Amino acid sequence: MLNHPVQCWRKRGERGSALVELTWLGVLLLIPMLWIVVTLFQAQQGAFAVSSAARAAGRAYVLAPSDAEGQQRAEAAARAALADQGVDAPVRVSVSCTPYPHQCHQGTSVVTVRVATRVDLPLLPDALGGRAPSLALDAEHSVPVGQYQEVDRAPQG
């Protein structure tokens, strides 16, 4: 029976194909898995960056002598914190205060700074919608006005 040409061809035709199939299956599964892992790392990096930017912007705002200068310092601090983490995207900084919404540097005010930005998803072309797909990220940080101000503790006598 082994001398029949059809049976010999079938037996030899199946040899080594498992290795080729396994290789293609590995490549087809590995590439999307690798993209997911890289995307998760980008998202985590962006989340950490936006969180530290909100914290830095809150401190900068509270340490400023006025609300107008505080807004400028908060925006600069947020951009610097994002740049330190490698996030190069437009940033939006908004500030709100309680209980005095129009005078944030009052003695008992609590300043809340919200920083919003986006992180582009890696390895995706711009052709999918005009610009690279991205994740929107934002963070808030609240700071009491007197927390970071220097207090003169000279002995009274």
Image: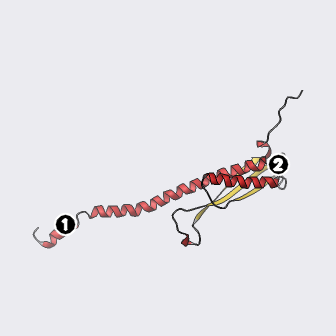
What is the spatial separation of the Cα atoms under label 2 and label 1, in whole angstroms?
Answer: 84 Å
Tell me the SS state at disc 2. Answer: loop
Give the residue at x 19% y 69%: 10
For the C terminus, give its image quadrant. top right
Badge 1 density bin: few <14, some 14–19, many ≥20, Cα 10 Å: few
Note whether 114 is above or below 152 in the view shown: below
Q: Which residue lies under the disc numbered 1? A: 12
| Residue 78 visible to an observer of this rendering | yes
Q: In which quarter of the image is the N terminus?
A: bottom left
Q: Position of residue 70 (x, y in %)?
A: 78, 52
The reply to whether dot 2 and dot 1 touch (C-beta < 8 Å) is no
Q: In this view, does 144 lie above or below 128?
A: above
| Image quadrant in which you'd find residue 46 | bottom right
Q: What kind of residue is marked 2? A: Pro
Q: Is residue 145 left or right of residue 29?
A: right
Q: Is residue 10 left or right of residue 60?
A: left
Q: Quick one: SS at disc 1?
A: helix
Amino acid residing under circle 1:
Arg
Instruction: From the image, tell me which residue sits under label 2.
Output: 65
